[in-house]
Amino acid sequence: ITKDDPVVQRLFTGIKEGKRAALAESITLVESTHPKKKAQAQVLLTELLEDAHKSRRRSIKGISSFRIGLSGPPGAGKSTFIEAFGKYLTGQQHKVAVLAVDPSSNTTGGSLLGDKTRMPELSRDMNAYIRPSPSGGTLGGVTRCTNDAVVLCEGAGYDIILIETIGVGQSEYAVADMVDMFVLLIPPAGGDELQGIKKGIVEVADLVVINKSDGDLVPASKRIQAEYISALKFVRPKSNYWTCSVSRISSLTKEGIPELWQKMKEFCEVMSKYGEIEHRRQKQHKVWMWNHIRHSILQLFKEHPAISKHIAYLEHMVAKGAMTPGYAADILLQKFSKNFDDNK
Ligand code: GDP
């Protein structure tokens, strides 16, 4: 497959013209496991990256998009927030792409219905593009597709990319490794809620936002805000140029949203000025590469005929305590490398 491939050419032109159908089709292409489609996707992505590289050299600030990650416990109001925040941004002449990372998702690329009901107004907005999480089990697979989707959306001229985590677990960390700014959205619930939110995730946040700060919930929001402010005093800042702060907003009344955007822009300006965004992205690209390798090698390993037939038995022995995990791993690794050498 080369860049002269008709599918690649058609999609490249469509994306550069900002056609949503071409963007949607391209994301489906990167999510495909079909070898030819995968190859086409890689050529298309390379074309877009080269194109972005050329225009980046012409731009002054060095970044043409702002990637924001959003995490928070279920019920924190993420969908409501994205709807309100997304509409605010498109109202400011931005083009917003919303991507989701949900390794537990069983939805197919076509079932946008879920997002239409979650974000009814934004999904009708011509300057917004909402894409549900790729289905397909492993976090590694989902993050890879999402990384590629970011490149595609940026190619299509979306200047703000919002990446939302839906599932709980490791996906927050995966998203933190994909974005320029990581935002934690918290509901104003009781004090034990703070313990429920993994401590570690606060450490990767660039901004904590207490949502639902409206009506009867204002006092509770203020209390939670104070709790987070004091908790953050014990967290080492992620960057020398930015300290994580705690904002209060309401996604229902939209109070605090313009101020929140102001704060995010401030982050973007300060971090670009010191080259931190570029630096983060460079580090992230290396992390992605190794994640993809780890993911593919593990897949190769598990599916290898010399390995797969022994897995169940060895897992059983390890679980029973009849064999040490390290010994079982060594047996499998030896079988794998022996087969590798034999094939050379
Ligand atoms: P998600 O699970 O994080 O996506 O949360 P949702 O966006 O579905 O919101 C969960 C519930 O919280 C819904 O009933 C929303 O109406 C409500 N909610 C979301 N944002 C706000 C807010 O700013 N204020 C109030 N009072 N309720 C909110």
Image (cartoon, grey):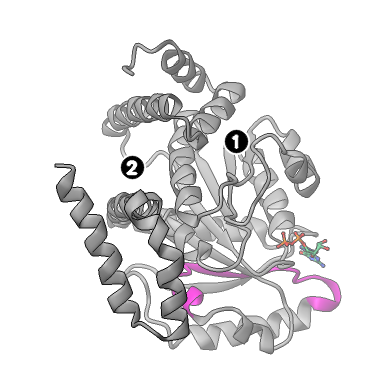
Which residue has dot 1 on it? 93
**Which image quadrant for residue 236?**
bottom left
Write the start and end of the magenta stretch as one range.
Answer: 200-217
Q: Nearer the viewer, residue 193 or 259?
A: 193
Q: In the rendered image of this protein, does residue 148 appear above or below residue 15?
A: below
| Residue projecting furthest to the right | 216
Disc on res. 150: none
Location of ligand 1 given as a quarter of the image = bottom right
**Which image quadrant for residue 155?**
top left
Q: Nearer the viewer, residue 269 or 76?
A: 76
Q: Secondary structure at mark 2?
A: loop
Task: Confirm whether the magenta stretch covers residue 30.
Answer: no
**Label tally:** 2
- Expressed as whole percent of the image width and height from the top left, the position of residue 280 reads 32, 56
The residue lying at 31 percent from left, 17 percent from top is 2
- Expressed as whole percent of the image width and height from the top left, the position of residue 265 reads 49, 54
Q: In the rendered image of this protein, does residue 171 appear above or below residue 285?
A: below
**Label 2 CB less than 8 angstroms from ligand 1:** no
The residue lying at 56 percent from left, 47 percent from top is 136
Question: What's the amino acid at mark 2?
Answer: Lys
**Which image quadrant for residue 216?**
bottom right
Residues at marks 2 and 1, CA–CA distance in whole angstroms = 19 Å
Which residue has dot 2 on it? 61
The residue lying at 51 percent from left, 17 percent from top is 14
